[in-house]
Image (cartoon, rainbow, N blue to C red):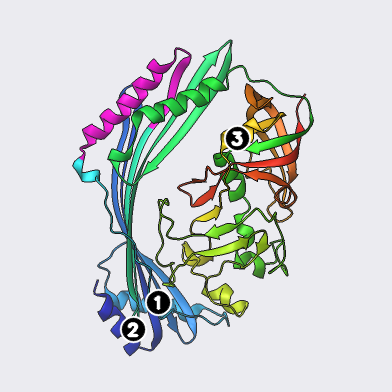
Amino acid sequence: MDYQLLIAKAKEIGFSDIEIYVSSSRDLSISLFKGEVDKNEFSNTSNISIRAIYDGKMAYLSLENINEDIDFVLDNLKNNAKSLTTEEEFEIYPGDENYPEVQPLNHDFNKYTNLDKINLLKKIESSIYDADKRIKFVSHCNYIEDESAVQIINSKNLDVKQENAFCYIAVEAVATENEDNQTGFEVSVKHRIDEFNADEICKEVVEKAVSMLNAKSVKSGVYPVIIENKAMSNLFATFTSIFSGEAAIKKITPLLEKLGTQILSEKITITDDPLNSEAIFKHPFDDEGVACYKKDVVENGVFKTFLHNLKTAKYFKAKSTGNGFKTGNNIGVSGTNLIIQPGLTSIDELIKNTDKGLLLTSFDGLHSGVNAISGDFSLKTAGYLIKNGVKVRPVTLIVVAGNFFKIMKNIEDIANDLKLGYNGIGSPSIKFNGLAISGE
């Protein structure tokens, strides 16, 4: 489709503004089970989403055919606009003077054949079985690669494009001893295949499964608790919506009227960092064409800003923070790489400085056991009992409960082991002075 011709014709027939959002994705997915390939799928898709303002109404149209007839497109947009009754004001962004630079893609996917990728999975799977006789089952051994691109062109002379590529290996193994079964799961996400370390992936999966064998509960009580970085990232992820300008408009965030006030421990700084060097996804602009930039959402415990798209920014008489991202045809609000900044202490030191406490490494029921508005949570969890600064045994069948906003004011120390997940949420391990544990 000739996008400039589409824009010109739209202006001719009375559209005040029009925007074309072009996305494409190339995906490969390989699954291995007991040495045999049970899935090898490839897809190559493109999609065009068009927004256009006619008579003050914003019409939307999604196309899978990138060569669709322009007159057909404009007729559908005009009819869509005429059917709308909303009085809301809409805006198509003219663009920013400057956009941050992103390093060009440097993936190596095409240097490896599908057979090479299958053999890598086979090596990992067989190494897991060989690593420990208690490993009885490798339930998942998957490889996925993805190349994607987004381009935004509009009638206000905006024309920006970004590309991304990543690959990941996901493995799960089951260990058995004394009729006890435990699983270990690991996801390794990279920009290049040659960055994978098969031995490290194997070691992580086996250690996670085997180390939890014969786990048992602990007595109920209040314990000093260290939440490990990955588990802390997952817990934090369930509360990130409170920073959204959309949540503020709907009054479903506890942060209303709290800009500039202390909401968390002064040890906590939360940064939205779209170009973080360790991130899998980097964002020079959002899905409205607004330039992204690094910002502190919480600084030393003080709430500094909501995250905004154009609509929420207008509502609060503020500027978009470059956090407008698509959910279907709608532009929502989400963080780019939302990170709890690390401290200076190692995780080993946090454990060493704990006389008796718990190291929590996983949570179950994060979607059902959390209330993001009130901050209350009650979650099944597992990890390790710490005595005299040493992990002494695995722990399971316990529940940790509390209020996120209260515990985030009751922090003893923060580790230096920041883990930024491929979902764009990151946290180091954090030690809390005392959390309520229900067990025996």
Residue 318 visible in the displayed image:
yes
**Horizontal arrangement in the rendering, residue 7 relative to residue 174 (left or right):** left
Please tell me in which quadrant of the rendered image residue 115 appears. Answer: top left
Q: Which residue is mark 1?
A: 77
Looking at the rendered image, the disc whose residue lies closer to the viewer, 2 or 3, is: 3
Residue depicted at x 39% and y 42%: 189
Answer yes or no: do the residues labelled 2 and 3 have beta carbons within 8 Å? no
Q: Which residue is mark 2?
A: 10
Which residue is at the far top?
Answer: 178
Q: Is residue 93 above or below residue 301?
A: below
Residue depicted at x 52% and y 51%: 425
Pointer 1 or 3: first along the chain = 1
Image quadrant for the C terminus? top right
Q: Which of these two is toward me, 74 or 334?
A: 334
Residue extent of the magenta highlight: 112-141
Q: Which of these two is toward me, 232 or 363?
A: 232
Q: Amino acid at mark 2?
A: Ala
Please tell me in which quadrant of the rendered image residue 431 appears. Answer: top right
Pointer 2 or 1: first along the chain = 2
Magenta residues, dominant SS class = helix
Whether residue 398 appears in magenta in the rendering, the answer is: no
Dot 2 alpha-carbon crowd within 10 angstroms: few under 14, some 14 to 19, many 20 or more: many
Looking at the rendered image, the disc whose residue lies closer to the viewer, 1 or 3, is: 3
The CA distance from mark 1 to mark 3 is: 61 Å
Answer yes or no: do the residues labelled 2 and 1 have beta carbons within 8 Å? yes
Q: Position of residue 290 (x, y in %)?
A: 44, 72
| Element at label 2 | helix
Q: Is residue 337 above or below residue 132?
A: below
Q: Which residue is mark 3?
A: 349
